[in-house]
Image: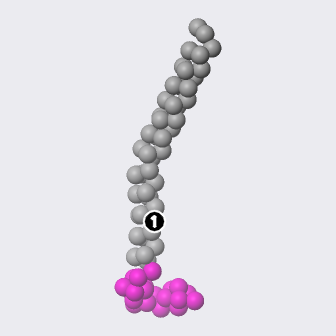
């Protein structure tokens, strides 16, 4: 094999490795996005006025601690 052929094979391997890496990242993106969405929505629900009102009804001391 001459140097030009070896360089072409290495370049093809680099592109293949980059493509595989990108595919892995894209494959994981929906999972990460789902987890972040669940965390975000949980925080939003926990901080909502309805949950605070329910918390105040169940435990007045807890509600006072939460609103500090």
In magenta segment, residue 62: yes
**Quadrant where the C terminus lies?**
bottom right
Q: Quarter-wise, where is residue 23 in the image?
A: top left
Q: Quarter-wise, where is residue 3 in the image?
A: top right
At label 1, counting other C-alpha atoms closer than 10 Å, the crowd grade (few under 14, some 14-19, many 20 or more) is: few
Identify the residue shown where x is 47% and y is 34%.
20
Identify the residue shown where x is 40% and y is 76%.
45
Q: Magenta span covers which residues? A: 47-68
Residue reaching furthest to the front? 4
Where is residue 58? Give x, y as percent.
41, 87
Q: Is residue 2 above or below residue 42?
A: above
Q: Is residue 46 above or below residue 3?
A: below
Under circle 1, the secondary element is helix
Q: Nearer the viewer, residue 34 or 54?
A: 34
**Quadrant where the N terminus lies?**
top right
Residue reaching furthest to the top? 1
Name the dominant secondary structure of the magenta segment.
helix
Q: Which residue is mark 1?
A: 39
Where is residue 59? Give x, y as percent.
46, 87
Q: Nearer the viewer, residue 42 or 53?
A: 42
Coloration mode: one colour
**Is residue 58 visible to us here?**
no
| Apparent side of residue 5 relative to residue 41 in the rendered image (left or right) | right
Residue reaching furthest to the right? 3
Identify the residue shown where x is 56% and y is 15%.
5
Q: Nearer the viewer, residue 14 or 38?
A: 14
**Is residue 27 visible to us here?**
yes
């Amino acid at each position: 094999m001459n140097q030009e052929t070896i360089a072409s094979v290495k370049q093809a391997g680099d592109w293949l490795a980059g493509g595989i890496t990108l595919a892995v990242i894209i494959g994981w993106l929906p999972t990460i996005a789902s987890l972040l969405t669940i965390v975000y929505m949980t925080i939003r629900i926990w901080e909502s006025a309805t949950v605070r009102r329910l918390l105040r009804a169940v435990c007045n001391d807890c509600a006072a601690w939460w609103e500090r």
